[in-house]
């Protein structure tokens, strides 16, 4: 028999709930009064104060009646103990027992929760709103565990913070590790609303990374239950962008209006029109959100890729300076690239350029290119056949493994049937129609002359330094056969 000494002495009964950051037990005092006690480990990194927030004046909150410390003698673990009134059941219990709820019943539950969020808007964010934390107490659905989310994050290492919330109910901004606001609670309540009306969540996971992708990128299915007004409201609550969701006060007012309109058909047509507009706005907002995410991701990748390639270029430049001090260098700046002159040759290390999204003007390859550059080796004057030199493309892309970006080298040629000529053979091409044709499964005017290969800085420096030496002595000639090497289709295919 375990005894917890607070202002009164409480005997712990059976465990009735709990998760990763606490356990809930039935509790009885000497007078036979029933309550529950939540035991939360005194974990390093989180102070007891994290579990307390100021909820004065807020409706429908499960109160903490008393608190103190408790040591479990069986495992020598120290806990904080919180005494709370015994609720009739949780919303999770209610959903398990009843399945899909009637719209009026669901709205009644949402009204209680929205009232709490409205009272606390701008003051407190729950950050882990889910049916397990909504309890039926004294005839109202009340929120519990206001401090647990903050406590969870404080006791979790930075590289695993994504597990400090409930993946099924986490807003997109929570997955991006942004600061939680009341909009995250509105999103979670939208998921609860969807679950009550549909019988299942819109996103089913089942694994953490599945939930992440779904909350960030996937469309929310349309609700089929309830009047158009409540369906539109739930759709707005589940917008990807926090700023597009209704405020708790607006949410509460519209829920009250929805409850009155459930049995009335007078405004049904107007509500249905609004629902269609919300769905349209939601799709537009989702696409804008995805575009913003793509732009932000590409900006970060471009910065990383630029830094990597500039380092490779500097290594080649330094190798030339060390081995051939007579070489002259025009080094405008990092943006404009580098040009090296030696004897009768010129080697250009092109600038690193951002690659626009979908630049192909042809059937696009399966991989994405974020940045591109190139290397151009030229004779001062063309030979008797008009040959000037060779150039290779450098792309920062995920050619071999999805979302793993690295620099690759390749070069292009015209097919034997082409009537076009080019003084450079092989030649570079930016991501666009020419390169897309060369990478295409069908027969087109262009093809690879040099295989797509990962950029090896040492091999790259040695090879281009060797070619520069040949060119400086007038020994750079058109390759005797094209393609120069086998060009296997080793990149990711559709």
Image: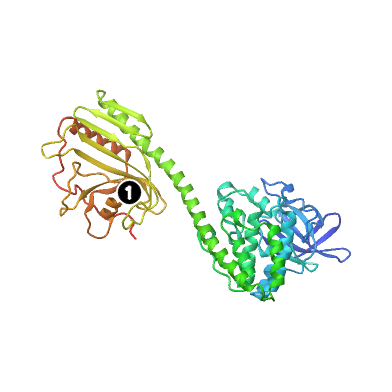
In the picture, measured across the screen, residue 131 lies left or right of residue 410, that is right
The quadrant the N terminus occupies is bottom right
Left or right: 256 in relation to 241: right
Q: How is the image coloured?
A: rainbow
Q: Which residue lies most toward the left here?
A: 384
Q: Residue at x 21, y 54 (%)?
A: 445
Q: Residue at x 19, y 49 (%)?
A: 483
Relative depth, front residue between 165 and 246: 246
Task: Give the residue number, with chain letter if any, for mark 1.
Answer: 431
Count neighbours of disc 1 (C-alpha within 10 A) and say few if under 14, some if 14 to 19, many if 20 or more: many
Q: Is residue 310 above or below residue 34?
A: above
The answer, for residue 209, to whether it is visible in the render is no
Could you say where residue 125 lies in the image, as x and y percent from the top left? 69, 53
Q: Quadrant of the C terminus?
A: bottom left
Q: Is residue 65 above or below residue 389?
A: below
Q: Is residue 49 visible?
A: yes
């Amino acid at each position: 028999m375990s005894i917890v000494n607070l202002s009164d002495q409480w005997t712990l009964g059976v465990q009735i709930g709990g998760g990763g950051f606490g356990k809930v037990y039935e509790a009885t005092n000497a007078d036979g009064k029933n309550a529950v006690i939540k035991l939360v480990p005194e974990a390093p990194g989180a102070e007891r104060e994290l579990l307390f927030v100021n909820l004065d004046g807020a409706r429908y909150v499960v109160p903490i009646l008393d608190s103190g410390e408790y040591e479990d003698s069986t495992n020598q673990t120290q806990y904080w103990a919180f005494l709370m009134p015994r609720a009739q059941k949780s919303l999770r219990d209610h959903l398990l027992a009843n399945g899909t709820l009637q719209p009026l019943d669901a709205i009644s539950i949402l009204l209680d929760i929205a009232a709490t969020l409205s009272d606390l808007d701008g003051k407190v964010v729950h950050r882990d709103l889910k049916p397990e934390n909504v309890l039926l107490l004294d005839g109202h659905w009340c929120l519990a565990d206001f401090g647990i989310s903050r406590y969870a994050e404080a006791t979790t290492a930075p590289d695993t913070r994504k597990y400090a919330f409930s993946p099924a109910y986490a807003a997109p901004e929570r997955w991006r590790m942004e600061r939680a606001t009341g909009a995250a609670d509105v999103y979670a309540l939208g998921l609860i609303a969807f679950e009550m009306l549909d019988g299942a969540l819109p996103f089913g996971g089942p694994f953490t990374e599945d939930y992440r992708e779904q909350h960030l990128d996937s469309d929310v299915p349309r609700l089929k239950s309830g009047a158009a007004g409540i369906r539109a409201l739930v759709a707005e609550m589940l917008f990807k962008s926090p700023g597009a969701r209704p405020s708790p006060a607006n949410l509460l007012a519209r829920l009250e209006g929805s409850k009155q309109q459930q049995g009335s058909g007078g405004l049904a047509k107007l509500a249905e029109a609004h629902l269609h507009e919300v769905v349209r706005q939601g799709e537009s907002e989702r696409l804008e959100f995805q575009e913003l995410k793509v732009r932000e991701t590409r900006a970060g990748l471009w910065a990383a890729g630029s830094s990597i390639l500039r380092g490779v270029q500097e290594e080649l430049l330094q190798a030339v300076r060390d081995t051939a001090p007579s070489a002259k260098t025009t080094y405008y700046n990092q943006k404009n690239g580098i040009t090296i002159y030696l004897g009768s040759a010129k080697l250009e290390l092109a600038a690193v350029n951002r690659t626009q999204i979908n630049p192909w003007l042809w059937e696009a390859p399966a991989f994405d290119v974020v940045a591109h550059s190139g290397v151009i080796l030229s004779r001062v004057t063309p030979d008797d056949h008009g040959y000037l030199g060779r150039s290779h493309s450098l792309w920062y892309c995920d050619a071999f493994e999805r979302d793993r970006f690295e620099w690759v080298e390749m070069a292009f040629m015209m097919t034997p049937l082409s009537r076009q000529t080019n003084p450079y053979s092989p030649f570079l091409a930016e991501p666009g129609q020419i390169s897309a044709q060369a990478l295409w499964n069908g027969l087109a005017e262009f093809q690879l002359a040099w295989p797509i290969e990962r950029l090896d800085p040492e091999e790259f420096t040695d090879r281009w330094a060797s070619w520069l030496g040949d060119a400086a002595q007038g020994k750079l000639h058109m390759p005797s056969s094209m393609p120069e090497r086998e060009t296997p289709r080793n990149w990711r295919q559709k």
